[in-house]
């Protein structure tokens, strides 16, 4: 009965997330942007698959990946060998990233658009190396108690230095990779891993803050990996062209059947490193009882099935329709429709991201319910809506370059990190990674590339890519602003309570009550604030 209730709750959550996107597409089809019947049917089938797959996936994550990540994180904190800790972290970070479906989707898109100039396998390897190195540093940061604001300031300072010597093509792909690599597999595992490590620290005052930030630190490794590779390759310009959608070259049955085995293999590769690590830790460390092993195994199987169904729906239904919508809307004489749809897509697609649901759930759990999921959803939705709108404006206005968004944006993120609690800093950078998942890497990116293909003189590589980087940046600003607002509210409540205590100090023994319920506990905020 418990499992059925949880599954029903997940289904309601997913329906509320996916249906708005479906309604927007159907409304456009019957009004200003009619689409081919085959493409609409594929999209509707894809919508059903996304709903079913995402529901099963999220249910499986709860039972499988999260217990594994927390168990490995807890075990690694007890390791007395520094070399063993670093080695395991590097290997784990590399293989989890290497098999991430979102990264493979982006790498294949880059390979196709650039006609193989930036090989997909090379991109996956260099990004995975960067993820492994930075994830290891992130874990050492938790154990060493280094403040997040210093780590992010140093990391993005290094990224800025490499960006000065990089081309616009590799800059766009690098920041896109940082968002795409933190997807359906890596995010739940990293969040659970960070929570497991933080929970075992002797100093418990920073546990909440240390439960977040690992995803954001790890995703920076993807940027560094691609930027360094671009400098080594020495390619001045990547030429690109939009590949022809396969939906037009076969029946719906052929389209879905052709994708199924490839997606199933990618999903298997995604879970294989985690399965191997769990077996090793189970043999040498966990010693879970039979019932627990059965629960985890069932969770892994459900995660695999859900991921296959979800990615099948996204790749075969959503992606190609996104490209066609971008082409049609950008080709209109008025640019208002394409700008409006860009905003609406951003507001809704983030709600369908699997990793966003995982992050918001863990935020509410770690903070004991004081940080409400709905509030995080609202801030993320507005941020991603503005992100895709800004990306569309960048394509329509040739004078706007990607660095004009990223330089002041990430600079402001670094500055705000010194004025908000560490808990919100970690949440913010993690949110930047999880907001750019499968839906963004497929439907939204395809939509933006369709726009760039329709605008004369637009560069499909430099401008068709880069959207995910803006999507990864804006949620950081949004969550940090949320932290700043609530810290100001908390200070105001503290002053009010102090004034009440002062007025009652003349002999009254009445009970003082703060009228404002803080977003985070006062003790935690005091520990994390400057």
Image: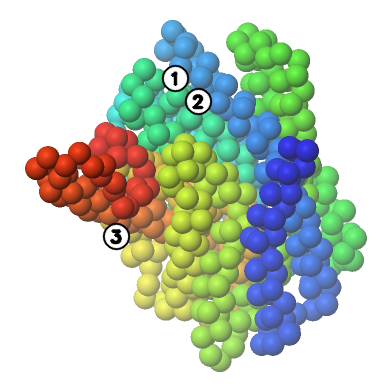
Quarter of the figure with residue 450: bottom right
Mark 1 = which residue?
200
In the image, 81 versus 205, the foreground residue is 205
Location of residue 35 in the rendering, given as x and y in whole percent from the top left corner: 75, 80
Give the alpha-carbon distance from disc 1 to disc 3, as whole Å. Answer: 37 Å
Q: Secondary structure at mark 3?
A: helix
Mark 2, Cα crowd under 10 Å, few <14 / some 14-19 / many 20+, is: many
In the image, 405 versus 213, the foreground residue is 213
Mark 2 = which residue?
196
Residue occupying image coordinates x 70% and y 69%:
22
Query: Which numbered disc, 3 or 2, marks the residue closer to the eye?
Result: 2
Mark 3 = which residue?
408
Q: Earlier in the sequence, mark 1 or mark 3?
A: 1
Contact? badges 2 and 1 (CB < 8 Å): yes
Q: Please give left or right for residue 347 compared with residue 402 in the image.
A: right
- Looking at the picture, does residue 384 appear above or below residue 232? below
Give the alpha-carbon distance from disc 3 to disc 2, as whole Å. Answer: 34 Å
Contact? badges 3 and 2 (CB < 8 Å): no
Query: Which numbered disc, 1 or 3, marks the residue closer to the eye?
Result: 1
- Looking at the picture, does residue 109 appear above or below residue 41? above
Rendered image coloring scheme: rainbow
């Amino acid at each position: 009965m418990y499992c059925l209730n949880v599954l029903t709750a997940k289904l309601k959550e997913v329906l509320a997330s996916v249906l708005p996107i479906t309604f927007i597409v159907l409304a456009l089809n019957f009004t200003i942007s009619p689409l081919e019947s085959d493409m609409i049917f594929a999209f509707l089938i894809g919508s059903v698959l996304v709903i079913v797959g995402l529901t099963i996936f999220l249910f499986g994550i709860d039972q499988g990946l999260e217990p594994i990540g927390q168990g490995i994180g807890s075990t690694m904190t007890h390791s007395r060998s520094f070399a063993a800790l670093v080695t395991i972290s590097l290997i784990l970070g590399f293989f989890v990233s290497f098999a991430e479906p979102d990264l493979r989707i982006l790498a294949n898109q880059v390979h196709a658009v650039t006609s193989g100039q930036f090989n997909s396998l090379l991109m996956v390897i260099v990004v995975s190396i960067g993820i492994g190195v930075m994830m290891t540093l992130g874990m050492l940061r938790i154990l060493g108690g280094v403040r997040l604001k210093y780590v992010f300031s140093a990391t993005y300072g290094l990224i800025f230095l490499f960006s000065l010597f990089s081309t616009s093509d590799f800059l766009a792909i690098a920041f896109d990779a940082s968002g795409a690599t933190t997807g359906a597999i890596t995010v739940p595992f990293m969040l659970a891993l960070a929570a497991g490590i933080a929970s075992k620290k002797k100093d418990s005052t920073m546990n909440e803050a240390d439960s977040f930030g690992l995803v954001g630190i790890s995703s920076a490794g993807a940027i560094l990996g691609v930027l360094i590779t671009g400098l080594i390759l020495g390619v001045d310009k990547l030429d690109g062209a939009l590949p022809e959608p396969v939906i037009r070259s076969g029946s719906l049955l052929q389209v879905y059947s052709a994708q199924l085995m490839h997606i199933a293999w990618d999903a298997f590769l995604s879970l294989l490193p985690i399965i191997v690590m769990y077996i090793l830790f189970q043999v040498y460390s966990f010693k879970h009882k039979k019932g627990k092993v059965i629960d985890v195994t069932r969770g892994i199987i459900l995660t695999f099935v859900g991921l296959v169904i979800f990615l099948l729906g996204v790749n075969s239904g959503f992606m190609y329709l996104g490209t066609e919508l971008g082409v049609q809307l950008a080709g209109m004489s008025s640019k208002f429709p394409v700008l409006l749809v860009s905003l609406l897509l951003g507001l809704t697609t983030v709600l369908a991201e699997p990793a966003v649901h995982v992050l918001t759930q863990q935020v509410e759990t770690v903070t004991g319910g004081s940080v409400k999921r709905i509030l995080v959803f609202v801030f993320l939705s507005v941020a991603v809506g503005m992100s895709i709108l800004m990306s569309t404006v960048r394509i329509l206005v040739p004078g706007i370059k990607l660095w004009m968004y990223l330089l002041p944006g990430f600079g402001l993120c670094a500055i705000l990190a010194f004025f908000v609690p560490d808990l919100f800093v970690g949440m913010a950078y993690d949110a930047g990674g999880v907001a750019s998942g499968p839906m963004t890497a497929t439907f939204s990116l395809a939509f933006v590339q369709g726009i760039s293909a329709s605008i004369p003189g637009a560069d499909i590589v430099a401008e068709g890519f880069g959207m995910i980087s803006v999507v990864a940046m804006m949620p950081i600003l949004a969550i940090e602003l949320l932290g700043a607002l609530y810290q100001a509210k908390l200070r105001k409540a503290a002053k009010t309570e102090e004034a009440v205590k002062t007025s009652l100090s003349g002999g009254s023994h009445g009970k003082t009550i703060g009228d404002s319920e803080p977003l985070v506990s006062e003790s935690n905020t005091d520990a994390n604030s400057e």
